[in-house]
C-alpha cells in the first residue's frame, strides 16, 4: 500500500530506511501501512489514478511551478467612436461643411450636391 506522511517520524523503519518527510509518500506492506495510519502518522494514498481531462492536464502542466497564478485576460476595451467634427465656421471651405453633414448622417453624395449656403442653412 502507498501512504503519505502527515507527521514527522524520527528514527528508522524496521528495515533501517528513514521515514520520508511530512508530505512524502512511500510504499509499505499492508500491515505496516495499517499500523502507521492507525497511529495518525500517515494517510493512505489511493492507488487508482483519477482520470484528468486532457485540456485540464495541459493547464496543470503549464502552470506547474509558476510563481504566480494565471489570471484570465482582461476583456478588450470598447472601440472608441471617432469624434464628430466640430461645426465649421461660416467662412470654412465647402469640403468642411460636407464632412460635417456626413458626420451627422447625410449621404456624402447628397451633401456634395448641395451648395455651401444650402448646407449652412440645413445644418446651421
Image (spheres, rainbow, N blue to C red):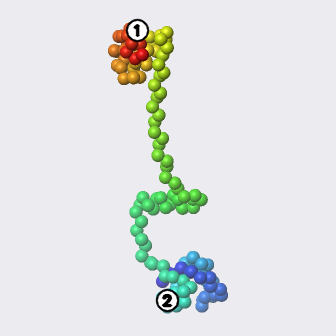
10 Å crowding of disc 1: few (<14), some (14-19), many (20+): few
Label 2 neighbourhood size at 10 Å, few (<14), some (14-19), many (20+)? Answer: some
> Which residue is at the front of the view, 7 or 24?
7
In this rendering, the answer to whether 39 lies above or below 103 is below
Q: CA distance from mark 2 to mark 1?
A: 99 Å
Name the residue beneath numbered marker 2: 34
Q: Quadrant of the C terminus?
A: top left
**Which label was assigned to residue 117?**
1
19 vs 1, left or right, is right
State the SS at label 2: helix
Residue 51 lies, in percent from the top left, at 40, 68
Q: Quadrant of residue 53?
A: bottom left
Residue 27 appears in the picture as rendered:
no
Is residue 116 shown left or right of residue 5? left
Q: Secondary structure at mark 1?
A: helix
Pinpoint residue 64: horizontal percent, then vertical percent.
54, 61
- Residue 104 in view of the camera: yes
Between 26 and 85, the one nearer to me in the picture: 85
Of residue 17 and residue 33, the one placed in the foreground of this image is: 33
The tag earlier along the polypeptide, 2 or 1, is 2
The structure residue drawn at horizontal position 49% and vertical position 61%, both measured from the top left corner, is 60
The residue depicted at 57 percent of the width and 76 percent of the height is 23
112 vs 29, left or right, is: left
**Mark 2 touching mark 1, by CB under 8 A?**
no
Q: Is residue 1 above or below residue 86?
A: below
Where residue 76 appears, as percent x and y from the top left, is 47, 43
x then y, percent, for residue 10: 65, 86
Amino acid at each position: 500500500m502507498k501512504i503519505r506522511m502527515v507527521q514527522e517520524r524520527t528514527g528508522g523503519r524496521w528495515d533501517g530506511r528513514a521515514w520520508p518527510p511530512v508530505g512524502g509518500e512511500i510504499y509499505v506492506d499492508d500491515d505496516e501501512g495499517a499500523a502507521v495510519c492507525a497511529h495518525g502518522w500517515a494517510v493512505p494514498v489511493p492507488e487508482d489514478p483519477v482520470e484528468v481531462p486532457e485540456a485540464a492536464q495541459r493547464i496543470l502542466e503549464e502552470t506547474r511551478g509558476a510563481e504566480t497564478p494565471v489570471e484570465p485576460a482582461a476583456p478588450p476595451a470598447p472601440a472608441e467612436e471617432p469624434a464628430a467634427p466640430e461645426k465649421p465656421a461660416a467662412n470654412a471651405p465647402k469640403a468642411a461643411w460636407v464632412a460635417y453633414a456626413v458626420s451627422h448622417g447625410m449621404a456624402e453624395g447628397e451633401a456634395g450636391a448641395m451648395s455651401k449656403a444650402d448646407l449652412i442653412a440645413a445644418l446651421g
